[in-house]
């Protein structure tokens, strides 16, 4: 933490010492970067407005992210702004850069707020950064009027105020009200150190299921081999090429190889399957379960 604070102060001091650009110089640097890809011009432009990036980053400290990381993201937003800035539009670079800096910082904060992604749509971003402020104001106004808002009324008013669907408000409320917990944390002092991860259901296959599946697979394989043995060589070849290859062959390719029409290959394939079905059905009634 002390190292981060030192870095923050160092970055801030360097930014405050940077030159202040007048409109004419700023425009000249912007043209030099856009038209000539002059890296020195880009460096001067970025350095001059780094104080703006740091100032905007400091407004997001309340979300718990390290200030040094916020400044880094703000710097990335500033560089994106410089790369996309069009000096012909007659707008000051600082005005244009504000949007890119803010967007970069907001994306970083939302990515790191929780292990579960909070969201990335415009309505979700608007809720994430404004919901608590709007909620507090609505509750103050209701209290001053002697009214009490229930949860549904409050969510409905927030939805109308921010202009987002009610469902998004309810979802964001749940995400902002909770926090991430370690699965290795103990449930309570009364559980003799039992961790939350011990209470999770094991979704992996159990030993009995594995044995049963292995037995069924072996039985089915034996039935299929016996059924294949009842076919002649040409029928076995067609079934193998059509159904047992990772990349099944077409009727046309088999017909070309065997000197048969595509329709004749289809008929032989259907006849082979008919023979196999009869063979399987004669071996055991249990196979009906596998043929469904």
Image: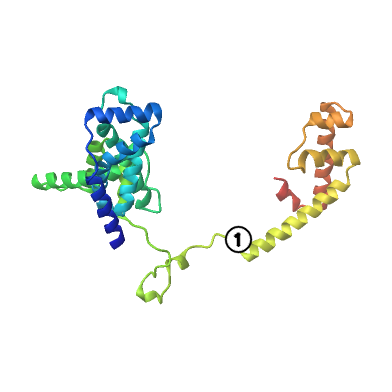
Instruction: Specify the quadrant of the image occupied by residue 204.
Output: bottom right
Q: Residue at x 54, y 59 (%)?
A: 203
Quarter holding the C terminus is: top right
Q: Residue at x 89, y 28 (%)?
A: 259
Q: Residue at x 31, y 55 (%)?
A: 66
Residue 244 drawn at (x, y percent): 77, 43
Left or right? Give the position of 256 relative to 107.
right
Residue 38 drawn at (x, y percent): 38, 32
Left or right? Give the position of 108 relative to 142.
right
Residue 127 drawn at (x, y percent): 29, 42
Identify the residue under disc 1.
Answer: 205
Instruction: Specify the quadrant of the image occupied by residue 77.
Output: top left
Q: Residues within 10 Å of mark 1 (few under 14, many from 20)?
A: few
Residue 101 drawn at (x, y percent): 30, 40
Left or right? Give the position of 227 relative to 208.
right
Nearer to me, 104 or 120: 104
The correct choice, above or below, for 111 with respect to 206 in the image is above
Q: Residue at x 73, y 42 (%)?
A: 246
Secondary structure of the residue carrying numbered label 1? loop
Quarter holding the N terminus is: bottom left
Left or right? Give the position of 235 relative to 80.
right
């Amino acid at each position: 933490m002390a190292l981060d604070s030192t870095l923050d102060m160092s970055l801030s001091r360097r930014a405050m010492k940077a030159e202040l650009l007048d409109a004419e110089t700023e425009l000249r640097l912007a043209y030099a970067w856009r038209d000539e890809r002059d890296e020195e011009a880009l460096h001067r432009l970025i350095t001059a407005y780094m104080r703006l990036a740091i100032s905007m980053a400091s407004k997001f400290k309340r979300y718990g992210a390290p200030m040094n990381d916020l400044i880094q993201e703000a710097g990335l937003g500033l560089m994106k702004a410089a790369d996309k800035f069009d000096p012909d539009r007659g707008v000051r670079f600082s005005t244009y850069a504000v949007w890119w800096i803010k967007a970069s910082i907001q994306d970083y904060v939302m990515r790191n707020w929780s292990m579960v992604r909070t969201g990335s749509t415009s309505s979700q971003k608007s809720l994430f950064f404004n919901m608590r402020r709007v909620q507090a104001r609505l509750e103050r106004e209701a209290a001053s009027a002697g009214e009490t808002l229930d949860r549904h009324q409050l969510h409905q008013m927030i939805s109308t105020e921010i202009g987002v669907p009610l469902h998004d408000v309810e979802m964001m409320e749940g995400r902002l009200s909770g926090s991430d917990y370690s699965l290795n944390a103990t449930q309570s002092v009364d559980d003799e150190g039992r961790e939350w991860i011990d209470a999770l259901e094991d979704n992996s296959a159990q030993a009995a299921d594995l044995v049963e599946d292995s037995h069924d697979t072996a039985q089915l394989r034996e039935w299929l081999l016996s059924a294949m043995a009842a076919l002649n060589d040409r029928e076995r070849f067609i079934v193998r090429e059509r159904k047992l290859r990772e990349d099944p062959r077409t009727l046309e390719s088999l017909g070309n190889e065997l000197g048969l029409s595509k329709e004749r290959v289809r008929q032989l394939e259907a006849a082979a399957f008919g023979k196999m079905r009869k063979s399987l059905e004669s071996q055991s009634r249990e196979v009906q379960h596998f043929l469904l």
